[in-house]
Image: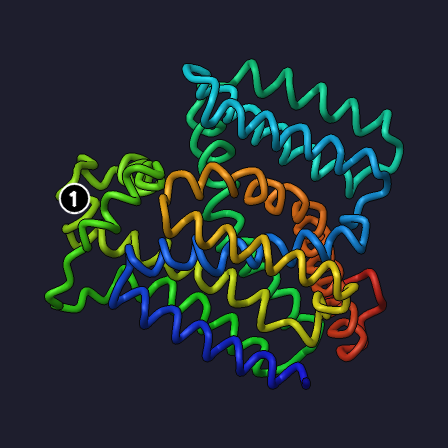
Amino acid sequence: MKTSTVDLVNIGLMLGSCALAFLLPFELFLFSYAVIGPLHYLTEINWLHNRKFFTTSRIDYYVMFVLGVLLLLFSFFVKGYGNVVNVLFFVSFFYGLSIVLVRKFSHKLLFLVAALLIGAAFRKTPLLVFFFGLFVPTLLHVFLFTGLFILHGALRSRSLTGVLSLVVFVGCAVSFFVLHPDTAYRVTPYAERALVDSTFVNLNASLFGLFDLGPANRQTVFESAIGLSLMRFIAFAYTYHYLNWFSKIQVIKWHHVPRRQLVLVFVIWAASVGLYAYNYYWGLIALYLMSVMHVFMELPLNFRSMSGIAAEVRRLGTRRAASEGVPAGDFRKN
């Protein structure tokens, strides 16, 4: 499949996700997280495993696995240690960065210890609580990093459709805050209960506080114009993030794995969807480790993508300088 065709497919997926987010924001988010999400986790982890998670040592993903298990325990089973969860996300973020920056495990261990000490010292600060504890595993992962992947692809392909896909992606996100259609939409009782029981509503409430949008209560989160705008944005970000992965099947070739692995992936996926259908909260607990592991294990790839963007920008600058007759490395015109 040509790159331009993949871009056009993704533009269609963006617009479709955007339209559904406008129509059924809460229901779309819950459906995407419970049905599309687990298949994304399973196939991506399987793909990353076959590529050694883009790490330099097997110890790296053992460390990430231990951090994921600790997050599961402190998020659901060990109560009263909410700050520990924030610190663990902080540590995971910087350990993922160390995987890209250094090769020796002893140096990565220094990153790990430093991140633990810094995280413990600043565990109650808004930056660590909101950014690392809340946004890194949610909107930063599904929206910002997805946008960076799109930008990297557009820079590498030098294609008009690649640039257009980035414009559409940003345009869809902005549309939720400038367009407020007058519809008769009301969140269903099931969706409201599932969002509260699963604690996903904490993300919406935190956004109210972070941007000083007023009190976060049932009416503002589920019925107000700004509450619906936030939920539409969240639903779009998650839905398209998952769909973007599946649209790249011919590019990434994540399905090129032993058939036995694929069969196991789909069996686990079917079981997870069934569990979510039976009880959303139980499904969340059962799939939580897989969810955070796919976030952690993708961090080295995210950082490599950011490095790739910087390299492409430098390459564009060098070509422009050469075309204008300026010696490479000196971008000042004579």
- Dot 1 crowding, Cα within 10 Å, few <14, some 14–19, many 20+: some
Q: Identify which residue, 41 or 302, lies in the foreground.
A: 41
Residue 290 image offset from top left, x and y in percent: 58, 43
Give the residue at x 55% y 14%.
121
Tag 1: amino acid = Thr
Residue visible at 55% across and 28% down in the picture: 71
203 horizontally vs 294: left or right:
left
Q: Which residue is mark 1?
A: 220
In the picture, which quadrant includes the C terminus?
Answer: bottom right
> Considering only vertical position in the picture, is 207 above or below 48?
above
Q: Quadrant of residue 282?
A: top left
Q: Residue at x 13, y 43 (%)?
A: 219
Do we see residue 81 in this rendering?
yes
Tag 1 secondary structure:
helix
Looking at the image, residue 75 lies above or below residue 330: above
Q: Position of residue 127 (x, y in %)?
A: 46, 29
Where is residue 240 drawn, in percent x and y? 47, 64
Res. 2 image quadrant = bottom right
Closer-to-camera residue (324/124): 124
For residue 334, say whether it is visible: no
The residue lying at 35 percent from left, 63 percent from top is: 174
Q: Nearer the viewer, residue 149 or 275?
A: 275
Q: Quadrant of residue 107?
A: top right
Considering every residue shown, the one lying at the far right of the view is 104
Please state the total of marks drawn on the protein image: 1
